[in-house]
């Protein structure tokens, strides 16, 4: 059978980076094998449903190039692909298990279960494990309760002896004592399926061959396998991924307000870089290469190289990967991405192409841009004259005054205001004074920017800002230094 994977998020808000990594691994597994990637929305937990979250899921996947082959918006042979639209079938499958003796009706009230939990707590036992009281009800008692209209859930009947074993592509062979397994609820009192039950039924009906998810589901996998066995269904290939941690002790979590994919984009990280980083967050490629396009990821993907150890989210590594992706952009593509960030602080008319050409090799994250270019429209006129001091060019406030006075008439004489024309004027002035170009150009950059670090040298910045503003600032600098 062709490889079929599914990404089945709950529409509960923004896309957490851990969820996006799972989607990526599922997408790569399908596409590397020439298979299908399915999108399924698991929205049965209406209490956590967030309006607009489904659109966020769509946009996030599309922005990252992970287009699905089947899903709620495009259909497919195994729909519907929204879990709440499939609820009618789950009770039927649960009833099948009851008839087969693999599940049972439980009529225990919430009050009884709460009292049971208190007793377990007082006795130092595992709190929350159901004591299987209704598992022993006779057929007559069950029918009597049903006829009386008593509320009930349907629970899975777990074996009490032996072990349930399964193989995971990452964690290997795992065995769990059946005595540790609780009789989990399959259908709730409102008739809705639990996540664990709906997940298994949907995966089977959609012919999912590979189930990829976080390692927190390892403990639930024996329950899933027992369901597959009870129905007589084939068990999928399991691939459990290590958790994404913010540090050695704390898991990265949407509920704890940790960074989502949308947060990272708003901070100026490129989608391609985020995806590239998530690839490496718990997975190791062969060789030294770390920068990959999505197509390259598909070609090199091997789920067996997923690591067992927790992955620490490293903002510095993400930033380095982002810088590499920015460097690989064409000049035109960088202008398109950078201009909105530039226009946050620069409203005047400037040479945007030249500015971006200088910004690109100096930019790690797009959000760095506003701080780097804000001087263009709002330079502090009273900056510290010590900025003019530079050991390499042997300049200080006094020599800079001399340099700027010599440069001013040369700049005023430039009519074709381009980077090359400005440089020629400055170089000619340096030749006349018999000094190195830097002795003149360094003070020029300080005078028109008010800062040591700028996206480009003095002539570049002058060309970006324009003739009028450059000459105005040089005159102002001369006045302050005199």
Image (cartoon, grey):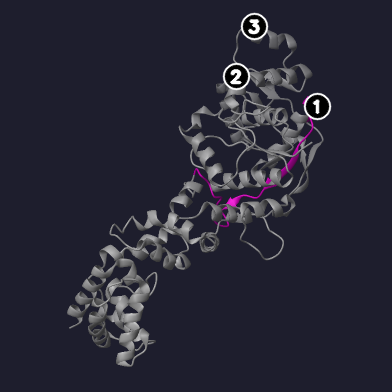
Is residue 193 visible in the rendered structure shown here?
yes
Query: For mark 3, what is the residue?
Result: 147
Query: For mark 2, what is the residue?
Result: 191
Q: Nearer the viewer, mark 3 or mark 1?
A: 1
338 versus 470 height, above or below: above
Taking the spot 74% from the left edge, 11% from the top edge, the residue there is 139
Q: Quadrant of residue 207?
A: top right
Instruction: Provide the secondary structure element on which disc 1 rests.
Output: loop
Q: Quadrant of residue 412?
A: bottom left
**Residue 177 location in percent, x, y?**
77, 38
Residue 231 forms part of the magenta stretch: yes
What mark, if any, has residue 232 been given in the picture?
A: 1
Could you tell whether 49 is left or right of 382 in the image? right
Q: Nearer the viewer, mark 1 or mark 2?
A: 1
**Residue 123 location in percent, x, y?**
63, 35
Give the residues in magenta.
229-255
Nearer to me, 226 or 127: 226
Residue 464 forms part of the magenta stretch: no
Is residue 130 visible in the rendered structure shown here?
no
Could you tell whether 91 is left or right of 473 in the image? right
């Amino acid at each position: 059978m062709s490889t079929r994977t599914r990404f089945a998020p709950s529409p509960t808000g923004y896309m957490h980076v851990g969820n996006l990594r799972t989607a990526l691994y599922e997408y790569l597994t399908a596409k590397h094998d020439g298979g299908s990637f399915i999108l399924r929305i698991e929205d049965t937990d209406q209490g956590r449903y967030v309006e607009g979250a489904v659109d966020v899921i769509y946009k996030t996947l599309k922005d990252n190039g992970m287009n699905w082959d089947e899903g709620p918006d495009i259909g497919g042979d195994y729909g519907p692909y929204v879990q709440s639209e499939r609820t009618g079938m789950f009770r039927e499958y649960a009833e099948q298990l009851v008839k087969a003796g693999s599940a049972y009706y439980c009529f225990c009230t919430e009050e009884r279960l709460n009292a049971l939990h208190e007793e377990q707590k007082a006795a130092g036992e595992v709190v929350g494990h159901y004591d299987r009281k209704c598992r022993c009800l006779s057929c007559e008692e069950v029918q009597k309760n049903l006829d009386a209209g008593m509320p009930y859930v349907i629970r899975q009947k777990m074996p009490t002896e032996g072990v349930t074993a399964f193989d995971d592509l990452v964690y290997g062979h795992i065995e769990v004592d059946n005595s540790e397994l609780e009789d989990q609820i399959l259908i709730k009192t409102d008739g809705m399926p639990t996540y664990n039950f709906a997940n298994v039924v949907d995966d089977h009906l959609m012919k999912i061959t590979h189930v990829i998810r976080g390692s927190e589901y390892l403990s639930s996998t024996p329950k899933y396998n027992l369901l597959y066995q009870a129905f007589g269904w084939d068990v999928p290939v399991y691939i459990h991924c290590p958790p994404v941690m913010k540090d050695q002790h704390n898991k990265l979590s949407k509920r704890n307000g940790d960074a989502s994919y949308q947060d990272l984009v708003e901070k100026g990280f490129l989608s391609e870089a985020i995806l590239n980083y998530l690839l490496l967050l718990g997975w190791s490629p062969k060789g030294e290469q770390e920068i990959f396009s999505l197509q390259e990821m598909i070609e090199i993907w091997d789920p067996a190289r997923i690591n067992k150890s927790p992955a620490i989210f490293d903002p510095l590594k993400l930033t380095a990967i982002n810088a590499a992706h920015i460097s690989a952009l064409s000049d035109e593509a960088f202008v398109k991405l950078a201009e909105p960030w530039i226009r946050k602080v620069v409203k005047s008319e400037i040479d945007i192409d030249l500015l971006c050409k200088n910004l690109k090799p100096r930019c790690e994250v797009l959000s760095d841009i506003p701080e780097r270019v804000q001087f263009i429209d709002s330079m502090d006129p009273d900056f510290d004259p010590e900025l003019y001091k530079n050991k390499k060019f042997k300049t200080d406030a006094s020599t800079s005054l001399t340099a700027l006075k010599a440069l001013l008439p040369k700049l005023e004489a430039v009519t074709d205001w381009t980077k090359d024309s400005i440089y020629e004027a400055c170089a000619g002035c340096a030749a006349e004074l018999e000094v190195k170009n830097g002795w003149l150009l360094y003070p020029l950059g300080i005078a028109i920017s008010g800062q040591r670090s700028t996206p480009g040298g003095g002539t570049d910045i002058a060309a970006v800002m324009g003739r009028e503003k450059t000459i105005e600032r040089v005159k102002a600098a001369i006045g302050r230094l005199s």
